[in-house]
Amino acid sequence: MDNLPEDEDSLVNQCIQENVFSFVNQSLLTAESVFKQELFLRKFHSLVTEFIVLMPIHVRELRATADKECMKIQAHLNEGLHPPNDLTKHFEEFLTTITLLYSKDPLDLKLHQDYWCLQDPSSKFKTRTPPKLICLLKFVKQSGEALPSQLFIPYLKMLTALTSSMEVAREVFTMLKNFAPYFCWDHFFTSLSWHLTHLKQDQTPSSDTIYHRHHHHHRGIAPLEVQGLQAVLGLIRTVASHDEMCRQKFCEHVQWNAIQVILSLLTCSVHIELKAELILTLAAFAKSPTIAASLWHQIEASQIIPTIHSTSNFQSRGVLSELEEVESRNEEYPVTRAMLTLLSELTNTPIPFSLGSGTRVPGLDPYIQYILNSVLLTFANRSYKSPAEKWEVARSCVHLLVKFVFDYEPRQEDFTGLLGGGEVGGVKSNPHPGSHIMLNMCSQSKLLRTIFFIVDEGCLGFDTYAPFPGKTSLEGATLECLRLLSCVLDLQKTFLSFIGNFDTPYMLSGLHKLLFGLNPRSNQLDHAANVAKYITYVSWLPEHAHYSAKILRLLTSYSTAHNDIRSSIVVSTSLRQAVLHGMVKCLEAAEEEEDEEEGEEEENEKDMHAMIAVGENGRRKKRKRHFVLVVIAQM
């Protein structure tokens, strides 16, 4: 402390020379706990913004030094030499500090909005913008002017981190319409089109027989260009995710032709990380229902997920080939996870009835086969560098299955379709995807064994009550499995009564019986017991406990299951006591929430809408408590 200079300028210079930004990036802003502390985030936001506003000379010096260093790097590259190792990257590290600080906002503080001089939309009068905010906006814009290539990616990432709300997304979209010749939307989409043309030249010519194969030297995209395109797509995706108007303008611009260019790039041989970014950008576009409907047909035409059998010797590189040939070998699955995200967004809106018509039987069957056969049913047999990614893949798949079952209402057409293709509106079509899931969940299928496997893995891990790699992702996967079991049991009686009216080849035992079947991993009849165990985790997994209690309550509606419940749960004294203890905690938590809501109801008794909302929440909590009471009564 004695060596610290007295004046602020010297102190700041010394901190910069000691790599303060690099230290902050590596030691502070990489810790998850930092983003849970509002006081720390506000203080650090204040430090960063005050440095920009109160010390603009230092900021300009950092940028000037960065420009000189970039010139040195370019000069060495032009001579075919490696750049020197002693170059400073203080400005780049400062941009990275801003990126890391604002890239996550779990507390919804919206601190990034200080950089954009946003006006309050509810105000009738235009207020004077504070000088501090003007300086921050000036910094954002000036940092992107005459940008050297070495700062292109750090600046794009910073801009992406500062674009985390609808208001800011519109500001960024407007700013980049004509920001700079080489830093605007026109240039970004022109670059994507150029790379597409470049890659198409590498593809095999139309004569695709084994007698006319021509081998071309694969040009590909340089690694630095891949990183730049990833940064560009990250910004496009963020802007599109946050604003409906921007999504529409991205997709409707004739010259950009965004969706078609992206889908065409997905059929080319590009780096899997870049391909994942392309798919996630489509997922951002799919948030708009009108775009999603059109996107379904364009995905079908592109065949990135094969839906039509082809005899061609040369197949375009879709997501299935990436999974089997590249991701499995690398033990990393960014393209598969991105594709599941895209399918999740697309299924948030009604699926076009005519999807695939003219080339195959319309419907979602090929996409269901991809989710089930290609991903979920084989996920446990693949190797993963990250345990979290393994369970994230499973969670995304089961989440889609839950959506299909939740939206499913059994119809006669579904069962005629299962027996050879039904007709809806005079057109032959595949049955609703929910019918496939119900058939598999009500029989001794590989899907049901996979769901039981995930539930069992959760019990083995959570029973340790200790942290382990991938724990958060496993929590998400097991929650989706419990939700799926709950949805299937809720719908099962209606479904089985429908299918009983048809002469089908399916042997359906019913999930209420299969839950009491043999677990090949433990050689015990403990599937229902594993489900019941999730009630014991109520202290940190309350949603799991809720669905576990609901599943047990649904089982009690079957008279034949009463003895099975007693034999699988009550017979074990330790498990019975643990489950009862968890149920008591569920009841206590429900009562505490009801007390809080009664207080809110008294405070808002003049507001009818608030009273209705509180009443609905109260009824949900009472239903949850009812599940628990019914199960306790059976025990």
Image (cartoon, rainbow, N blue to C red):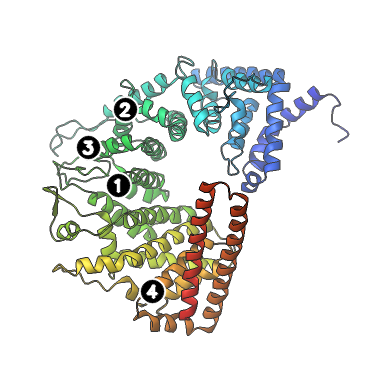
Give how far across and how far down residue 378 sits, in percent: 34, 59
Going from N to C along the chain, the mark reached first, 1 or 2, is: 2
Q: Mark 3 or mark 1, which is nearer to you?
A: 3
Q: CA distance from mark 4 to mark 1?
A: 38 Å
Q: What residue is rendered at 51% in x and 62% in y?
A: 621
**Which label lies toward us, 4 or 2?**
4
**Residue 390: percent from left, percent from top:** 44, 55
CA gap, disc 3 and disc 4: 44 Å
Which of the 4 quarters of the picture holds residue 435? Answer: bottom left
Residue underneath mark 4: 555
Q: Secondary structure at mark 1?
A: helix
At label 3, which amino acid type do we have?
A: Ala
Amino acid type, label 1: Leu
The three-letter amino acid code for the residue at tag 2 is: Leu
Dot 1 corresponds to which residue? Answer: 320
Q: Is residue 239 left or right of residue 503?
A: right
